[in-house]
Image (cartoon, rainbow, N blue to C red):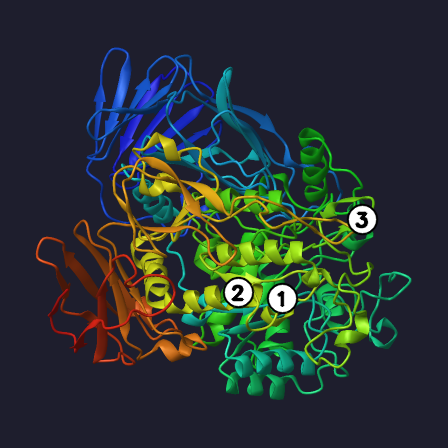
Amino acid sequence: MNIESVHRDPDGVTFESDERTLRVEAVTDAVVRVVYTGDSVEPPEESPMVASLPDGDVDWTLGESEDRFTLATDGVTLEIDRETAAFTWRDGDGNRLVREPEDGGKDIAEVTPADLATGDDISSPRDSVDRTAYETKLDLEFSDEEGIYGLGQHEEGISNYRGHTQDLYQTCTKVAMPAIVSTRGYGIMWDSFSLSTFHDDQHGSYFWTECDNQQEFYFVAGPDLDDVVAGFRTVTGQSSLFPRWAFGYLQSKERYEDQEEILSVAREYRDREIPFDVIVQDWRYWADDDENTDYSPIEQPDDGSWGEWGQKSFDPDRFPDPSGMLEELHGMDAKYMISIWPNMLSGSNRREMEDGGFLMDEENVSPSPRMEQGFTNVFDPDARELYWNQAKEGLWDHGVDAWWCDSPEPYHADWDIPVKMQPFERTRFNADTLKSTIDAEFMNAYSLYHSQGMYKGQRSVTDEKRVVNLTRSASLGQHRYGAITWSGDISATWEVFENQIADGLQFTATGNPKWTLDIGGFFTGGREFSWFKSGAFQNPEHDDPTGEGPEADDDDPTKGEGDGHAHKDPGYRELYVRWFQYGAFLPMFRSHGTHTPREVWRFGEPGETTYDTLVKFDELRYRLMPYIYSLAGWETHEDYTMYRHLAFEFQDDPEVYDIADQFMFGPSLLVCPVTEPMYYEPGGAERSTPIEGKAKAREVYLPEGTDWVDFWSGEHYDGGQTIVADAPLEKIPLFVPEGSVVPMGPVVQHTGETDDTPWQVRVYPGADGAFEVYEDAGDGYDYENGAYATTTLSWDDATGTLTVAEREGSFPELVERREVEAVLVGEGRGVGHEPAGDPVTASYDGTETTLEL
């Protein structure tokens, strides 16, 4: 683009040539919006990604020279070449962040969405698919030393996207999030829901999209990665705050079959005094017998196993009193999450959707019969309203607390393919399936609209219960709708487990802090002729490896008919414990899967290492609740990220850029999961076999910039070194930066018991430090109107003084007086998951209080 004219207005600058328009707008001092198009510039509020942009004026200047234009704010400078419109981005001090090639980096070519469609009847938020859109490409020149993170979740365990190519499309275990952050202190977020590709190698770097109304992206200058994420959320919106109970333990499996099994499992947790907050109902709670449905337009499998798939109501035979079931659960201080699906096979919900013309064209979808079921056209607001009303009348009105919105990609074309395709082939196969019913411009947007409909529906009937939506896909901006993404139907192997750590970190780097997974992997066993279902342990069809036979559990009311035996395999028990230890440090702590039950007592009894370790880490999760819920408050009010790539905390230490198996959980916990077997080698169809002589330890890199304290022993270590850390099955390596102040609490049975419990504060000496405790009612949306409180805990290392500052803010449920029990951590003191003996105590009433440690 050779710039021929320049038009300045209060919001930005428009550069024009004969055929192209380039628009640059300063959104804030650190956020710049860029649009490149051959047509008129569409305003930002037209995008479903954008929540709203700030109204405040930004001080910016436009300078001109013979060869370039320079747009500058206090935080970022953009240099634009007159002849090529090539960009060079600099920070507020003039340091170069990233640039385009000298001959220009922005390129667009006209396409027609209708020509990209692979079906005849395409659903779209726009009026027509027969319109002009653009294929776009942005070429970039990165610095050799920088690390690049983001792009969503893509199964591969990539820690740093330098030297990698990634296609962005939605399917069961892939999540498309077109945003990157760089250790140079900047980020780029593309306003695109199209099929897209990030590419970086020795031949060049670029981001390509197949179909967009205009090339549009937001550039954000840091300097810190947290600042970059805050800039993303300036555009995409505030992350909604989950209720406190959503940070407790969620017990799930595929599936609880009836009302009595649900209640029996909850009672067992309470009887055993194992903390938990939520029990989760997976699919097929609806009527199983298709012959008795009032409407069934689609042919069932021979075994009739789908039933009224997608019907949002309970089977009266297996759930005769759902309101009573929910009342009893709530009486046990437990919550209930339930799975709902946008596809509808039969039943009254399906008929209502058909009558309204609200189903997408199922005849276009061919890879698998499971997809020919009629997916709700969530791009239609009237369809979203009906979908919510069905969920409300059939489920919510019985007392349901949370949603599990399954299959919002909405298609996963390669589920039933025998062998995993090559990347290019797989991309086209999945993308073409999506484009058989969805406008190519919005191919990756289904989940965003789906979550929006559920969020707005629930908010329309109450502000007393916060929206919790566990969903399997995501788009940029979805975090504002009470949605958390889980990583899909993954398999139980050590490789998959390790890959998940980095996959989640890449997801949260895009600005959406809400990510989790199925602890233990969904598929524990494998399936012949299905690459997708490749767990390394016992199938349900295999014999019980203990030799006891299936009848051994026949009298157990908490065991379902479909449960297999992998939980009795010592190799799977080892993997499950390691996965559970990792899961205790995720934004949502939830076990789930098929082939074998997942309740804690399935893995042993008290006194056995596996059982005791699961209970220990469950209790540790609850002991950390003051810390965890504060991080959640920071995410909402301060644009924080709880589950953090090491580069977020140690941006200046290049040694962390490629580490894929360690992470920070908040500012104070370095978590180092164990991702390889130490005791048993998986046996596949056979029982796992013992491993002889393997060290029960793993290497840990302790980042530079701080010194560290072992959480379990209190021993101090210098930063900037690799050590070998003990890692027997009973623990994983955890380290705390010197100067950390970590608020904890006693062991409780559910998060509702944490309201007035003491703050048990651990101080890790060696440096000054502070932590801001966040409190609110724990549920409801009064926090949006300022109903919350914060208290800063500050440690002065030189004087040995912990100061509990004057409380700021208030809310009606606030505990005005709370005991503070503080301990100075040392070797053997204030360590591990047990409360410290003989702490220094004070009664805190909201006024400044000091404790001498």
> Which numbered disc, 1 or 2, marks the residue that appears first in the sequence?
1
| Amino acid on which the number 1 mark rests in the picture | Phe
Q: Seen in the image, is 450 located left or right of residue 657?
A: right
Where, by quadrant of the figure, is residue 262 drawn? bottom right
Against 661, residue 825 (above or below) is below
SS at mark 3 in the image: loop
| Local crowd size for mark 1, using a 10 Å CA cut-off: few (<14), some (14–19), many (≥20) | many
Q: Amino acid at mark 3?
A: Ser
| Residue 380 shows in this picture | yes
Marks 3/2: CA–CA distance: 39 Å
Q: Which residue is mark 1?
A: 603
Residue 379 visible in the picture: no
- Residue at label 3? 368
Relative side of 544 to 744, left or right = right
Q: Is residue 16 left or right of residue 224?
A: right
Label located before the other in sequence (3 or 2): 3
Q: Which corner quadrant holds the N terminus?
A: top left
Asked if marks 1 and 2 touch (Cβ < 8 Å), the reply is yes
Identify the residue at image location x=37%, y=57%: 712
Residue 820 point in image, percent of width and height:
22, 73
Marks 3,1: beta carbons within 8 A? no
Q: Is residue 774 above or below residue 363?
A: below
Label 1 sits on a secondary structure element that is helix
Residue 577 lies, with reference to residue 140, above or below; the image says below
**Residue that numbered label 2 is attached to:** 614
The image's mark for residue 732 is none
Q: Give the Cα separation between the discs numbered 3 and 1.
A: 36 Å
Q: Residues within 10 Å of mark 3 (few under 14, many from 20)?
A: some
Instruction: Residue at the far right: name it.
Output: 302
